[in-house]
């Protein structure tokens, strides 16, 4: 099985940056994604240049920190102080909102590229890019920016009894694959290591972690197993750069 060992949230804090880049340097991670509007974005972009063998994705954001292009059209995603806030999203967004999202996401992509980062793929903060109402925005942005690799919705989480959830995700992932190159499987590393499920040996899977976050310390500990002889004998570690 081919696996992408991926860390989210580069740029969110100096602690997260340090944790992720240490793991990239040790070879325990092969990929990470960067928040263009994160407080420590510039440090993350600068340090990424020392890891040309790793992939660095665009961690699109509509759920935390200030937008790069404040706009009335972003109101459904904003708190009273004008920062992004994690909110419920309606099934449909009007044209003004969609245009504002497209402009904001393109600005985030431009910010990363202007800092010298080669964007390998798209994923997002709190998986916002997988919301059905935002699919038209995602398709437009990726077409305009010529980005053809995108992260799936979860294919496993450790709780596979949620049948409706699984059907919804299967349908959404099928839609993504009509336009983008994606992995076969995607889910948390900890769920993969601990879970009873078995992924096909011939598949390509992205396994996600969040180094530097207190609430995800078990995930980071699980990366020790990924450097073990047992894991390496069964898995080929790759990055999004190898996905085609």
Image: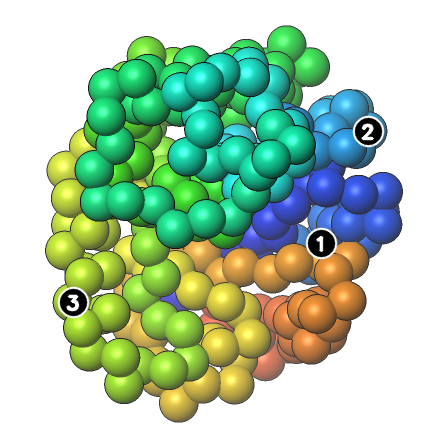
Q: Which residue is mark 2?
A: 43
Q: Residues within 10 Å of mark 3 (few under 14, many from 20)?
A: few
Instruction: Pick the residue in front: 39 or 147.
Output: 39
Nearer the observer: mark 1 or 2; the answer is 2
Q: Which of the 4 image quarters holds residue 139?
A: top left
> N-terminal of the two: label 1 or label 2?
1
Q: Is residue 194 left or right of residue 48?
A: left
Q: Give above or below for 126 relative to 64.
A: below
Q: Which residue is mark 3?
A: 167
Q: Which residue is mark 1?
A: 27
Q: Give above or below for 193 relative to 77.
A: below
Q: Residues within 10 Å of mark 2 (few under 14, many from 20)?
A: some
Q: Tell me the residue at 47%/76% (across/down).
A: 192
Q: Tell me the residue at 27%/44% (across/down).
A: 90
> N-terminal of the two: label 2 or label 3?
2
Q: Which of the 4 image quarters holds residue 80?
A: top right
Q: Which of the 4 image quarters holds residue 54?
A: top right
Question: Is disc 3 placed on a helix, strand or loop?
Answer: helix
- Cα–Cα span, label 1 and label 2: 20 Å
Q: Tell me the residue at 52%/85% (across/down).
A: 194
Q: Position of residue 74 (x, y in %)?
A: 44, 25
For the N terminus, the quadrant is bottom left
Instruction: Pick the residue in front: 119 or 138.
Output: 138
Q: Position of residue 179 (x, y in %)?
A: 19, 32
Whether residue 45 is visible to the viewer of this picture, yes or no, is yes
- Cα–Cα span, label 2 and label 3: 40 Å
Q: Give above or below for 185 relative to 11.
A: below
């Amino acid at each position: 099985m081919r696996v992408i060992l991926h860390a989210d949230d580069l740029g969110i804090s100096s602690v997260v940056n340090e944790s992720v880049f240490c793991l990239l340097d040790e070879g325990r991670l092969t990929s990470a994604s960067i928040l263009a509007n994160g407080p420590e974005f510039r440090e993350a972009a600068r340090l990424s240049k020392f890891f040309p063998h790793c992939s660095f994705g665009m961690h699109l954001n509509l759920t935390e920190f200030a937008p790069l292009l404040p706009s009335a059209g972003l109101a459904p995603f904003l708190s009273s102080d004008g920062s992004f806030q994690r909110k419920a999203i309606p099934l449909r967004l009007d044209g003004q909102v969609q245009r504002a999202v497209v402009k904001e996401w393109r600005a985030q992509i431009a910010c990363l590229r202007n800092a010298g980062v080669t964007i390998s793929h798209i994923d997002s903060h709190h998986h916002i890019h997988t919301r059905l109402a935002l699919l038209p925005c995602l398709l437009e942005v990726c077409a305009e920016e010529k980005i053809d690799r995108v992260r799936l919705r979860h294919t496993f989480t450790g709780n596979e009894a949620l049948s409706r959830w699984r059907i919804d995700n299967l349908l959404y992932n099928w839609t993504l694959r009509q336009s983008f190159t994606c992995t076969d499987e995607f889910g948390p590393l900890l769920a993969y290591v601990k879970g009873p499920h078995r992924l096909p040996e011939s598949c390509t899977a992205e396994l996600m972690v969040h180094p530097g976050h207190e609430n995800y310390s078990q995930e980071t500990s699980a990366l020790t197993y990924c450097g073990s002889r047992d894991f390496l004998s069964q898995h080929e570690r790759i990055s999004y750069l190898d996905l085609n």
